[in-house]
Image: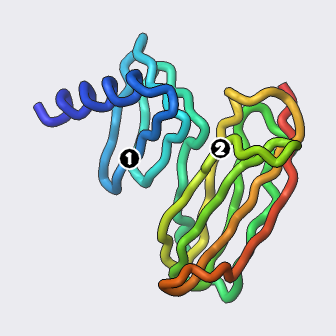
Amino acid sequence: MKKLILLIILSLTVSANSQSVLTLGTGTSLGVLSGTDICANIIGGTGILYGSGTICGGLLSVETIASNELPTSFDMSQNYPNPFNPNTVINYQIPNSSYVSIKVYDQLGREVYDLFEGEQNAGFYRITFDGTNLASGIYYYRITAYSGSNRVSSFTNTKKMSLIK
């Protein structure tokens, strides 16, 4: 019964607002039945989204990459593949707990996607980005990590990516 109620609430939330966010918590799974559409500007979290229906959104997932070591510095890798159509992967690492913001911008500097914003523990991370709703072109993605309670920027990096449809 809980799964059915969750699906109904998510369906109403996602379809009622064209600027929607679908977040899947740890241990959560959401099945999308054949013939069903789940569309949100941002689909994120650590849960599992699966099924044979249509799943559309800007962000497919933010994953923690398992490692026995912790990073010693901030870093963000070039996305791959690049150029991409429509999905690409962005890897990054943070050496200590930080408030992290990752955004995508068009060539004019306008924000087109807010990929992730929130607290993250030290570790290695991977974002899978879906550019289905974007036009072909050059885009920039930027990570900014803030430390401390006053949120002082401790790391910023911007990279270029190309979407070719």
Amino acid type indicated by mark 2: Tyr
Q: Is residue 109 above or below residue 157?
A: above
- Looking at the image, how many numbered discs can be counted on the residues? 2
Secondary structure at numbered mark 2:
strand
Q: What's the residue at 11%, 31% (across, down)?
A: 1
- Report the front residue among 19 and 25: 19
Measured in 3D between alpha carbons, the distance from the residue under mark 2 to the one under mark 1, in whole angstroms, is 18 Å
Where residue 129 appears, as percent x and y from the top left, is 65, 44
* Residue plotted at (60% across, 50% down): 115
Q: What residue type is labelled 1?
A: Leu
Disc marking residue 127: none
**Crowd band around label 1 with a 10 angstrom C-alpha radius: few (<14), some (14–19), many (20+):** some
Q: In the picture shown, does residue 92 fall above or below 74?
A: above
Q: Nearer the viewer, mark 2 or mark 1?
A: 2
- Measuring from the top left, give residue 9's x and y in whole percent: 25, 30
Identify the residue under disc 2. 113
On the rendered image, what quadrant is the C terminus found in? top right
At mark 1, the secondary structure is: strand
Relative image position of residue 2 (x, y in whole percent): 14, 36
Residue 157's x, y, as percent? 79, 68
Circle 2 crowding by C-alpha within 10 Å: few under 14, some 14–19, many from 20: some
- Residue drawn at x 42%, y 40% as measured from the top left: 22
Quickly name the residue at label 1. 24
